[in-house]
Image (cartoon, coloured by chain):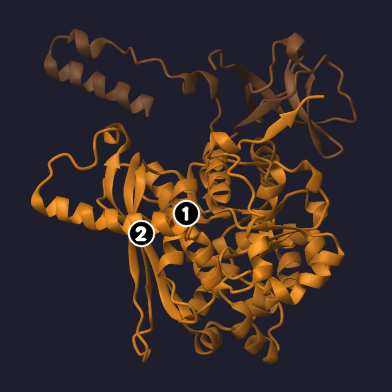
Chain colours: A brown, B orange
Amino acid sequence: MKKSDEDDSDKRAVHLGFPNPAMESTDIPLDLNKMIVKNRSSTFYMRVEGSFWEEMDIHSGDILAIDRGLELRSGDIFVGTVDGEFVLNKFTGSHDEEIDLWGVVTYVIHKTRS
Amino acid sequence: MKSKNGSLKTAKTPVFALVDCNNFFVSCERVFRPDLKDKPVAVLSNNDGVVVARSNEVKAMKVPMATPYFKVKDILRKNGTQLFSANFALYGDFSRRIVEVLETAAPYVEVYSVDESFLEVSSLEIEDYQKWGQELATKVERYTGIPVSVGIGPSKTLAKAASEYVKKHPETKGAYDVTEVTPRKKMLKWLPVEDVWGVGRALGSRLSNRGVKTAYDLTQVSEDWALKTMTIRGLKTLRELKCESNIPLETNSKHSQQKSISATRSFGITVRAPYQLESAVANFAARIAYNLRRKGQVASEVVVFLRSGVKDVHQHNPSINVRLSFATSDTAILTASVVKGLSQIIKSGHGYKRAGLVVHKLLLVEASQLPIIDTPTEEIIGKSERLMSVMDDINKRWGKGSLAIAREAIGRTDWQSKRENKSPAYTTSWAEIPVITLK
């Protein structure tokens, strides 16, 4: 989509003969989706319940954006499964055999106004 | 590259891949229920309490597809089967996700149904198709959580057969390549003739009676014999099995702007069961939503229709115009909407020969934030009011009236309790996203 927009503006610039300042601008209003969702096909959301991770600034009611398509890297927070339950964990570099990776947490969305 | 009717022409010998989701509805339900891994799971249709998807554990109980629930209730219960009522919004969303992954892997994708897509990959210069297919299967499962089987072959029919082979042969690790003669022969000798794409049970048993029992046997008959015994479609099938691609990939040109898109199908037989009609319209919805997205279009209305046979004495040719709450190309919304629309027009016990969907009032995505109706002429107002009254009627019935639909369709308290087993709208409603409890 983005690509064809650029193509169009190129064409217009040629036809007009001189650059139209309004056309030249490629500024697009900020879109939170584009920042948080890198892969539309592999991004899911989950809601946190419980205060266990408050020290890590993850609070009850927060929404996690989780990308299943990413490779796990050291320092990542990830959702895994143990004995059929979802768990949240921090990857320190060596994989815990008991935990199956479900997806990598990319953002924590925290609402500040009740 | 493309001919006028949208079919694909390639100079090279085509190579097709069929990507088929394993136990699709069940697999969708399991993504957010890790506790159900390796446990028996079955999905029942919305309308009539028929088994429409089975996990491998349920298949092992010898519960056939499309069995009415009451017939298999005891065996399912005895084995602790987790039952779900079909959640088409969820399945539609996963369908969309999978197609998006496939589009990153192949230049041409044809969404054949809600859980199957054909790819054409001859231009990719792939050296090892088997390995490519396995990697694709791994990627789809990693991205979406849905396991798939990938069959690769020189025709669509062979690709589809290869994907069947994958499902029954775990050692294939997700993919089977029949572009070479040795694996192809092995597969053809294994595949029962009735499981060949386009043959089916009735024709299959007729062929079987004449000694044509496997797909390989079918490749040995003459074209004359095939034409006489199986009509022109059968001849196509024979040629496809012999590596001559006769059924092209159907892709729609990305740039042609259409005012409406339709998908219809004649069943060939009279279809009475709501679950079959449901699955037909769900497949149409997946195809149409995909074509909309390819063209950067969104639809604001969708017509669902059913047709009796021309010669049927009792004609019932209902249609409903479902106005979507906003213009969309989302498979989840479209699928859920048409399934609900369908439930409004099906006449219990009545048989239909054809079903279809038409989406119209298409807009480009860029324009979709504008009001759908901006110059209210008298004609448009009248039309809009009629639409709204249909919509209100639907809303009224879905709300507190949804019980009435269940009663009308089933009349069994047993099933009503099962309707409560519909899983949350995990991916389409913020209020219903999965909860992770930290302790």
Q: At 28% from the left edge and 46% from the top edge, which residue is drawn?
A: B362
For label 1, the crowd category at 10 Å Cα-Cα, with few meaning under 14, some 14 to 19 and many 20 or more, is few
Of residues B408 and B381, which is closer to you in this image?
A: B408
Instruction: Tell me if residue B258 can be seen.
Output: yes
Dividing the picture into quadrants, the one containing residue B83 is: bottom right
Of residues B365 and A65, which is closer to you in this image?
A: A65
x and y percentages locating residue A57 in the rendered image: 70, 11
Q: At 68% from the left edge and 49% from the top edge, which residue is drawn?
A: B29
The amino acid on which the numbered mark 1 sits, given as a three-letter code, is Gly
x and y percentages locating residue A70 in the rendered image: 67, 25
Dividing the picture into quadrants, the one containing residue B373 is: top left
Left or right: residue B427 compared with residue B110? right
Left or right: residue B336 compared with residue A2? right
Q: Tell me, for residue B292, which label it has, or none.
A: none
x and y percentages locating residue B374 in the rendered image: 17, 39
Q: Earlier in the sequence, mark 2 or mark 1?
A: 2
User: Does dot 2 land on a helix, a strand or a loop?
Assistant: helix
The residue beneath circle 1 is: B399
Quarter of the picture containing the C terminus of chain A is top right
Question: Numbered disc 1: what chain?
Answer: B
For label 2, the crowd category at 10 Å Cα-Cα, with few meaning under 14, some 14 to 19 and many 20 or more, is few
Q: At 81% from the left edge and 36% from the top edge, which residue is drawn?
A: A85
Of residues B306 and B79, which is closer to you in this image?
A: B79
Instruction: Tell me if residue B286 can be seen.
Output: no
Question: Numbered disc 2: what chain?
Answer: B
The residue beneath circle 2 is: B393
Left or right: residue B92 compared with residue B368? right
